[in-house]
Image: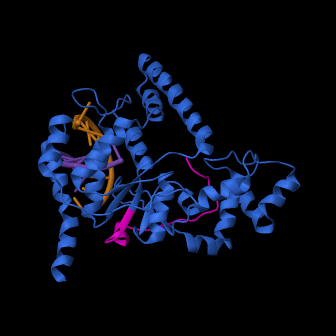
Chain colours: A blue, B purple, C orange
DNA sequence: CCCGAGGA
DNA sequence: TCCTCGGGG
């Protein structure tokens, strides 16, 4: 979900050409959730193999990854580690919504209401250990690097951009700005003939709003994040006005309200997140035999489609090889 | 969500 | 070349 900043943050329209040659650290949790909720039949049933294992995420991951590689983008997938204790409430709430939605999905199915069924099926999606493991296996076979975070995936991805190990983060959430990612790309999808890519640059956003990153974080804390509830009645616009004129501590004192967590602890979640600094980013060749074995034999995918996707992956190695040949 | 066939 | 739509696993 992330912090609700839509009302105060402008995004730039960009095209795939603007990302050509760049590496992108992808918020995997975000991406898998999109696939699991979106890739379904009309009545909400996800794609499944002959044994009943869900394959929606493998479908999405294979086709999207190969397509963005074909466009000259170099993906790095970043997986979540252990979430912060302060996120427990958010995680519990999401779990409750999932369970409720699963019930309502079944009910709608019994009533023969496909549209309703699909809506609730989408909300019932959950990322199980099987989903994670099978996704990592597919990435291995495609030769795409992935990095395991110690905490939030977005924190890790943002760190990698700060380090210069990735050019941009790809996520739907605004949280990466709080984590200090200088560049964030939204809607890194292929859907629709014309792409709907959006771009955010932290420096520009801060300059336009005339804020520091610390102030942006304080606005988020007032509005509410995955780690705290926020203050009732304060949205992005109000939060912006308040923080421009006063400190978070003073605002709270004047309003005679308290946060459930100490502000400095919340600030440090964004300013000093636990990250993995020991990772290797290397794009390798597709392991075609193992890929078809895994995707076609084990999970029932069409061989023609898998081979066609594998062919798109050659773009990565061709650009790398030509560089090696040069030196 | 993404693919690909087929029509405009 | 663009768009729609049915099916994918």
Using the rendered view, name the quadrant where residue A110 is placed: top left
Q: Is residue A21 magenta?
A: yes
Percent x, y of residue A305: 17, 47
Q: Quadrant of the C terminus of chain A?
A: bottom left
Using the rendered view, name the quadrant where residue A321 is placed: bottom left
Q: Residue at x 30, y 34 (%)?
A: A47
Percent x, y of residue A251: 82, 58
Q: Is residue A294 left or right of residue A124?
A: left
Whether residue A236 is visible to the viewer of this picture, yes or no, is no
Percent x, y of residue A112: 41, 19
Q: Residue at x 28, y 43 (%)?
A: A59
Image: magenta residue range: A1-24
Q: Residue at x 46, y 24 (%)?
A: A105
Percent x, y of residue A113: 43, 23
Q: Is residue A153 magenta?
A: no
Q: Is residue A286 left or right of residue A23?
A: left
């Amino acid at each position: 979900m992330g912090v609700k900043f839509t009302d105060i943050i402008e995004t730039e329209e960009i095209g795939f050409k603007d990302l050509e040659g760049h590496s992108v650290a992808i918020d995997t949790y975000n991406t898998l959730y999109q696939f699991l909720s979106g890739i379904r039949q009309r009545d909400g049933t996800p794609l499944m193999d002959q044994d009943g294992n869900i394959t929606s995420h493998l479908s999405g991951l294979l086709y999207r990854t190969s397509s963005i590689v074909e466009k000259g983008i170099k993906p790095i997938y970043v997986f979540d580690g252990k979430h912060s204790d302060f996120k427990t409430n958010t995680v519990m709430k999401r779990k409750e919504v999932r369970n409720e939605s699963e019930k309502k999905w079944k009910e709608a199915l019994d009533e023969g209401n496909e549209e309703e069924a699909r809506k609730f099926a989408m909300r019932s999606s959950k990322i199980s250990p099987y989903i994670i493991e099978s996704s990592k296996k597919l990435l291995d076979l495609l030769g795409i690097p992935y990095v395991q975070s110690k905490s939030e995936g977005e924190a890790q991805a943002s760190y990698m951009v700060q380090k210069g190990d990735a050019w941009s983060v790809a996520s739907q959430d605004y949280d990466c700005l709080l984590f200090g990612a200088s560049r964030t790309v939204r809607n890194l999808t292929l859907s629709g003939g014309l792409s709907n890519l959006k771009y955010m640059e932290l420096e520009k956003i801060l300059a336009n709003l005339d804020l520091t990153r610390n102030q942006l974080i304080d606005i988020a804390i007032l509005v509410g994040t995955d780690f705290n509830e926020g203050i009732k009645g304060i949205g992005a616009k109000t939060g912006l006005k308040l923080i421009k004129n006063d400190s978070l501590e003073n605002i709270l004192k004047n309003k005679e309200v308290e946060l459930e967590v100490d502000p400095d602890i919340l600030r440090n979640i964004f300013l000093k997140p636990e990250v993995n600094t020991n990772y290797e980013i290397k794009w390798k060749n597709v392991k075609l035999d193992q890929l078809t074995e895994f995707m076609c034999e084990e999970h029932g995918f069409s061989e023609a489609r898998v081979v066609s996707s594998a062919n798109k992956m050659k773009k990565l190695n061709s650009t790398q090889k030509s560089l090696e040949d040069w030196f």
